[in-house]
Image: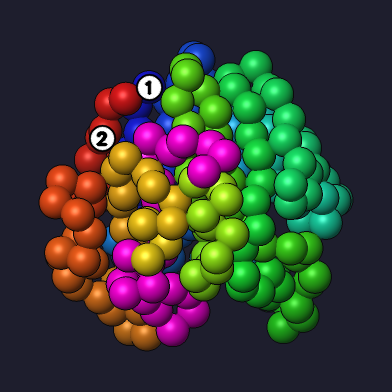
Amino acid sequence: MKISYHGHSVVRIETGGKTILFDPFITGNGLTDLKASEVKVDVIVLTHAHNDHVGDTVELAKRNDALVITNADLATYLGWQGVRTHGMNIGGAYEFDFGKVKMTQAFHGSGYATEDQQIIYGGMPAGVLLFAEGKTIFHAGDTGLFSDMKLIGERHPIELAFLPIGDNFTMGPEDAAVAAEFLQAKQVVPIHFNTFPPIKQDPQKFIELLPEGKGRILQPGEIIEL
């Protein structure tokens, strides 16, 4: 399994012959190494409806005939845009040909802003557990700290967790360090920082709050193999 980070909250996972892309905010993302016109993807997973997470989903899904997995409300809206979708909701899990996806709660918003200045209801924000090749990956999406992270970690031993640290809109480094403790992940990677001025952070300070060897900063395009 190959896992790579591409700025903001964009995570790519290659497993079971499939390429999975989480929250593909590429166009307008000054930190990414990707070009939307060149991305090949089989599955897109969206944690919530904010524009900096939905990003290039419609273009990528149509061009690649990719399946979009997200909450049922956002899946319905994207389906109206001509995208192939699979809707889920918090607490639910589904077995796909590449592995199992389970949605967890997240505490955040989820409205999608249209070009004509309308806010589309985007369903409940979520974190996502991916079970594949005998391993468990957790993408927390955008969220604040919550105590049920302990239950997530106890019930699903996590090899790798992606946690937001940007503050202002999500957890900051201190709360994210507590989240890492709750989740008991073997390895933790910070995401959702430095893309915009309100979420400017030094990720090294977050790493220093974790037990030695647990945290890892990934540069855009850098790969972890599990």
Residue 174 within the magenta-colored segment of the rendering: yes
Say what amino acid the circle numbered 1 marks: Met
Compare residues 11 and 37 and report the one nearer the observer: 11
Residue neighbourhood size for the residue with mark 2, other residues' Cα within 10 Å, grouped as few (<14), some (14–19), many (≥20): some
In the figure, is residue 219 to the left or right of 189?
left
Question: Image point 43% across, 32% down: which residue?
Answer: 13
Residue 2: give x, y in percent of width and height: 34, 26
Q: Total label count?
A: 2
Compare residues 186 and 12 and report the one nearer the observer: 186
SS of the residue at dot 1?
Answer: loop
Residue 15 sits above or below residue 40 on the image: above
In the figure, is residue 54 to the left or right of 2?
right
Question: Where the N terminus falls, by quadrant?
Answer: top left
SS of the residue at dot 2?
Answer: strand
Question: Which region shows up in magenta?
Answer: 154-177
Residue neighbourhood size for the residue with mark 1, other residues' Cα within 10 Å, grouped as few (<14), some (14–19), many (≥20): few
Residue 105 sits above or below residue 84 on the image: below
Dividing the picture into quadrants, the one containing residue 92 is top right
Question: Image point 72% across, 35% down: which residue?
Answer: 93
Q: Which label belongs to residue 1? A: 1
Say what amino acid the circle numbered 2 marks: Ile
In the figure, is residue 121 to the left or right of 35?
right
Residue corresponding to mark 2: 223
Residue 130: give x, y in percent of width and height: 55, 34
Report if residue 51 is visible in the image: no
Residue 90 sits above or below residue 156 on the image: below
